[in-house]
Image (spheres, rainbow, N blue to C red):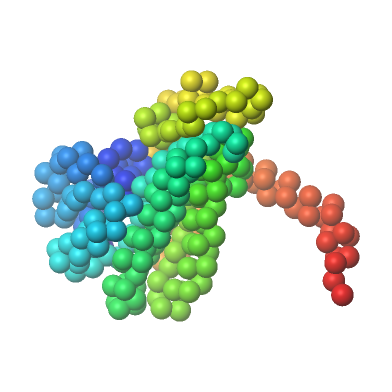
Amino acid sequence: MSTWLITGCSTGLGRALAEAVLAAGHQAVVTARDAGTLASLAAEYPETALALPLDVTDRGQIAATVSQAESRFGGVDVLVNNAGYGYRAAVEEADEADVEQLFATNFFGAVAVIKAVLPGMRARRTGAIVNVSSIGARICPPGSGYYAASKAALEGMSGSLRKEVEPLGLTVTVVEPGGFRTDFAGRSLTQSAEALADYAATAGPRRKENDTVHGTQPGDPAKAAAAIITAVESGELPAFLLLGSDALGAVTGVLEAERAEIDRWSKLTLSTDY
């Protein structure tokens, strides 16, 4: 039995993962901004579930959550940074305050939770950190520049963190899901108030009023949750894990295109050395 701390458990992948972790017999600190959405989980698993309110932009709530996790279960073995949301706008359209809030949640919030659990993990010389990113960080769709940037920042930090903590017995992985049937493209998706006509053909189709993908995504959140548990329990948690056939196809295509472009420009690249 291990103890998991999962952020963003009210719906979607976070909820599916919380249910799967508890059903597998683990202990779980399940969190959401509105802890009332987690009441049924706490009632079903009174001995192993601890439901707490957590807004990852609130440093006080983060500290209280980790403290209660340690008091109730003795420490956090697996942290899953799942809390986050989507934001769509052409780069020029976006409101600065919207972008700051996006990064406060998707990047700085995850960093703050990591920093709160690391002292305990370091002391015990064991622990796994799972940061939920998105294929958007690699495929960079038009209209998702700021969301892709927030997840790319999360991935860059995760790669360095993995190298820093591996000698201490800890590990870090980035999970990149493709499209899953969650609220991500529905209730949880935000966008700029302004829509400029010049971007109607690029960023425009991804605006909520034009997007028809919600509810038709190929990914099953329950299967994604099972895959994450399998990876964590494998004893060889990968640095990077794709989830979904669309994720595999899209990211493979990006990598192949990048390699071709690198090769095409390699002569110029090499010309800059002394």
The N terminus lies in which quarter of the figure? bottom left
- Percent position (x, y) of residue 127? 35, 68
Q: Left or right: 202 with respect to 237?
A: right
Q: Left or right: 103 with respect to 201?
A: left
How many numbered tags mark residues here? 0
Q: Residue at x 28, y 72 (%)?
A: 120
- Percent position (x, y) of residue 260? 79, 50
Residue 208 visible: yes
- Percent position (x, y) of residue 218? 48, 32
Frontmost residue, 26 versus 144? 144
Looking at the image, residue 30 lies above or below residue 172: above
Frontmost residue, 150 versus 68? 150
Q: Residue at x 22, y 41 (%)?
A: 34
Give the quarter of the image for residue 232: bottom left
Residue 22 visible: no
Q: Residue at x 11, y 55 (%)?
A: 47
The C terminus lies in which quarter of the figure? bottom right
Looking at the image, residue 17 lies above or below residue 66: above
Looking at the image, residue 130 lies above or below residue 70: above
Q: Residue at x 83, y 61 (%)?
A: 269
- Percent position (x, y) of residue 265? 84, 54
Looking at the image, residue 60 lies above or below residue 176: below
